[in-house]
Image: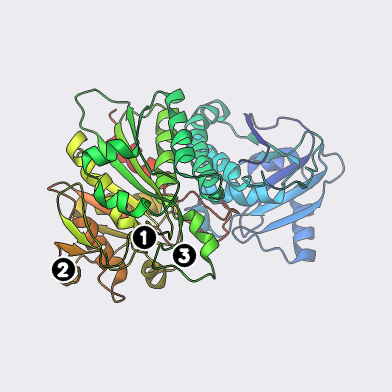
Amino acid sequence: MADAITITFGPLGSAGRGDLVVFVGDDLALGGAARDVLGSGGADLVARAASVEKFKGRSLSALVLPAPAGIEADRLVVVGLGSDKDRAKIDWPVLGGFTAGKVSGRTARVVLGANGAPVTAENAAEFALGARLRSYRFDRYKTKKKPDSDENGGTTLHLLLSEHEAAAQAAKAAEAVAEGVVIARDLINEPPNVLYPEEFARRASELTKLGVEVEVLEPARMRELGMGALLAVAQGSVREPRVVVMRWNGADSAETPVALIGKGVVFDSGGVSIKSAGGMEDMKGDMGGAAAVVGTLHALASRKAKVNVVGAIGIVENMPDGGSYRPSDIVTSMSGQTIEVINTDAEGRLVLADVIWHVQSAYKPRFIIDLATLTGAIIVALGQDIAGLFSNDDDLAARITAAGEATGEKVWRMPLAPSFDKAIDSKFADMKNTGGRHGGAATAASFIKRFVNDVPWAHLDIAGVGMSSNATEINRSWGAGWGVRLLDRLMREHYETK
């Protein structure tokens, strides 16, 4: 849930109470608008305070001091933008998040811009997006909450710039994206006793309020379709599985849809191949891919994106039980291909196999992107700031990579060599569900690839970025909602009709 934050846009020179935020480069020079607000002595004041505090104006640094006499403000907050090179490539969401962190719980007027850093309406909208994401916190289960210090509750930012009307308009789309990220974060952060498959499906169904068509497949329908792989994963839990198909039709009805597919294992104990106790509590986040898909559909529908998208998520709980599937079981997927189960903790790929096959068969998408917290191996390879990208299509992979660079949700392309595919051949079935320890992320991707027909496809292994997230200027949450911004950017730049 988002912390209480209010963001408005107004013209330069607007009066108001609270803090005053201005920006400087490493030369400590104030922009014209900031000079107008602070008066002739403003530059000297900042220079003297900077000397005392050893503030150099470096990127993402701040100097906080009492407001000078004659200035209607409680405090003056000077935010550094760095060198000319830094100012030429400002990450506006990150700057917005950093700034919001410096005035958290307060009211502030923010004079956007500095020497050498002109601000467009789009820049301001991205700044607001970052501020909203920084304000998020998940505390609904705390009985004692931290009080907000501002008398109106939460944080209030008045963003001041010359293009304020255009910025307010651009911010509507950015706010839709922020809402999508918040929805994904909420889903990831929820405990599994609250967010079981049926409840997850119910929450996804709320997208109908935005015009999204939602179909929920229950176990009887899954059996009719032959989803033997997904159902095998779910059979050890008392919580029945669900498959949710969400359709946003924002373009012409003749436009072929794109498909986004998410792994939704709401809790992964490992099943009979049970995980060790240490860290098992993090497995409530094993549905980060599904959360990203739901959040992305919300963002696209909320801003009325002109694109047709099918979002599908397979929601299961993987538990040990007398009825659980076992190592050495052979299950039949919806595709008709048989799978020897080597390890019941390699369950996400079984879920994706059936959901991918169903979406291909029913909707004939122009391409497929799946997102899954799939392997610990990808964390060993890439850490917790970059997701693994596997793809059978160079153009799609390049576009995803570019969208990741633009949003900061970065990916790194990994190989799909024939040897990885060979590693999942089985003596007893068409394939086995794990190829062993070596190249674990690549053999898992090769498994999924066997269920992709002649269609462009990309697999994002988000195990490192999807949960237990590193803190950043725009995220202080355990679940970052990774993927929503990347996918929204990808659709906006390449697949929406003009």
Can residue 359 be seen in this snapshot?
Answer: no
Sequence-wise, the earlier of marks 1 and 2 is 1
Can residue 497 be seen in this snapshot?
Answer: yes
Is residue 24 shown left or right of residue 461? right
Residue at x 49% of width, y 38% of height? 199
Q: Relative to the observer, which residue lies in front, 215 or 444? A: 215
Nearer mark to the viewer, of 2 and 3: 2
CA–CA distance between discs 1 and 2?
Answer: 19 Å
Question: SS for tag 2?
Answer: loop
CA–CA distance between discs 2 and 3?
Answer: 30 Å
Mark 2 is surrounded, within 10 Å at the Cα level, by few (under 14), some (14 to 19) or many (20 or more) other residues, namely some
Residue annotated with mark 1: 374
Q: Identify the amino acid type marked 2.
A: Asp
Nearer mark to the viewer, of 1 and 2: 2
Sequence-wise, the earlier of marks 2 and 3 is 3
Give how far across and how far down residue 216 sits, in percent: 36, 33
Give how far across and how far down residue 10 sits, in percent: 64, 29
Residue annotated with mark 2: 425
Mark 3 is surrounded, within 10 Å at the Cα level, by few (under 14), some (14 to 19) or many (20 or more) other residues, namely some
Question: SS for tag 3?
Answer: loop
Task: Identify whether 222 is placed above or below 393.
Answer: above
Residue annotated with mark 3: 384
Q: Identify the amino acid type marked 1.
A: Leu
Q: Identify the amino acid type marked 3.
A: Gln
Nearer mark to the viewer, of 1 and 3: 1
